[in-house]
Amino acid sequence: MYLQTLIVFALVFFRSDQLRGDSSAGAREWLWACAAVAVLLMGISALTKLATKVALRRMGGVGGDLHDAHHQHHRRMTAIKASLLIGFGVVLYATPWPIACYGLTRGPWLRIASDVLLLLPYFGGAVAIWALSHPVERAFREEGGEPRMESGAAAHGFSRWGFVLFNFRFHILVVALPMLLILFTGNLTRGYGAWIRRNVAPWPFTPDLLLGAAAFLVFLVSPLLLTRVWSTTRLEHGPLRDRLEAVCRAIGLRCRDVLLWRSDGMMINAAVMGLLAPVRYVLLSDGLLESMNDRQIEAVFGHEAGHIRRRHIEFFLLFAFVAMLAVSGALELLLILSPDLSNTTLELVGVLLTACTWGFGFGHVSRSFEREADWFGATCVTPDAEACALPCAVHGSRPCVEGARLCTTAAAVFASALDRVALLNGIEHEDFSWRHSSIGSRMRFLMALAADPQRLRRFRAALRRIKAFLLLTAVVGGAYALYYCLYREPLLLRAGSG
Ligand SMILES: [Zn+2]
Ligand SMILES: [Zn+2]
């Protein structure tokens, strides 16, 4: 739901920009706005209740497949969450709710209060979804839906509001807090735009540049914030931590800490965050540690480390930059060709182009990077030659050495970890994931890389091409954009500020 929340904030950001002038709503508009919000919340609640009822009946039915019912339920919940996003978009752009909210505050400093109020229907809808679907998750656990329940995890409390709070922190706050900081800064740079242009630099885009710099700063330090939003604690000293620290040394990974991610066993997940080592954390969830053996944990840890060592975060940032250049370049061209285009049309085209660039481009890059991290994670669990029981053409190479071929045993350990993640999270092997691709295809791909060093070489060459392309287009495109902004008069900026 992170992506969805990010989209929500982007929508609010643009809507707020459109309503920058004084806005105020009368009683009639308030009534209509509140009615729209109420319809949205009631609709989402009704859908969730219905889905919960259906899922509970299927799970309780004789001969019903518990896992299948749970899986179908998750699909329906994904659709309901998408409806919440669409419904909120309608409230934002087709009802006076934003006008009513922004009418309540005056001045750039207080505008953030209106932003928060504006967002409440989305937050409320999300809370309703979790609160009302909680019985399904509880039933799934009570029926022994998760194999790891046997290992004592059943003792975890699983109250409705604990579940809601966990999900709210996990899915919403983690995006919302940094985004609210950026929104707040945006209100200031927009509100004091004229002053900034007069006193900082006279370009029309100075306030936007400042905002971009502030957003980057928020991004840099956000791990410090996120470790507090999520409930985390230092991973205790012991054999596991020693092994993970040994992996860090072997691959030259520097981070501030390895954290245990507390979720009352609700989550089987690992993550890494932080561009810079002093604010970089690797997180391993309690559910993951409870349900996997040390080799598998090491493999998952290696995957997360791979994201850092292969510089995926940096390349994602480059992607965002290149995508922004490409979309604004296309819009600029469109304006040159037909100068009379209305702002609304321009925004619509911009949204469509952005959706395409990210949908196809980012999806492809992200899936490739996941596979590279899988490969990296597998190299981190390369065993000694004696311990490698499978037919393996590779043995003898040191673990995690660049360019090394992939050990079949190591690939199998990694694939087993992936398999476990799928099983415990109730994900089908062939479920497509836009960001990660399906677990089944990742397992097959990794085993194929181990079996065929030629394929591994081709795969790594393809990754080098992706990264070189991003780097080159960012540098060349960035330089040209700078030249264009300084020495020509970009129509886009005039349209935006006009
Ligand atoms: Zn990953
Ligand atoms: Zn081997």
Image: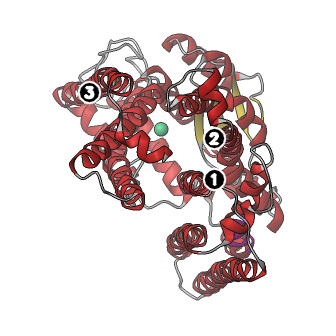
Residue 124 is one of the magenta-drawn residues: yes
Mark carried by residue 190: 2
Does residue 159 show up?
no
Spatial separation of the CA atoms under disc 3 and disc 2: 34 Å
Residue at the spot x=46%, y=23% of the render?
A: 380
Disc 1 target residue: 20
**Measured from the top left, where is residue 40 in percent x and y?**
64, 78
Q: Of residues 155 and 255, which is closer to you in this image?
A: 255
Residue 209, above or below 246? below
Circle nearer the N terminus (2, 1): 1
Residue at the spot x=76%, y=76% of the render?
A: 26
Mark carried by residue 469: 3
Badges 2 and 1: C-beta atoms under 8 Å apart? yes
**Measured from the top left, where is residue 442 in percent x and y?**
35, 45
SS class of the residue under badge 3?
helix
Badges 1 and 3: C-beta atoms under 8 Å apart? no
Q: Residues within 10 Å of mark 1 (few under 14, many from 20)?
A: few
Q: Is residue 200 left or right of residue 311?
A: right
Q: Residues within 10 Å of mark 3 (few under 14, many from 20)?
A: some
Residue 95 is one of the magenta-drawn residues: no
**Measured from the top left, where is residue 334 in percent x and y?**
26, 49
Residue at the spot x=67%, y=16% of the render?
A: 278
Q: Of residues 376 and 199, which is closer to you in this image?
A: 199
Magenta residues? 123-131
Identify the image quadrant of the N terminus: bottom right
Circle nearer the N terminus (1, 3): 1
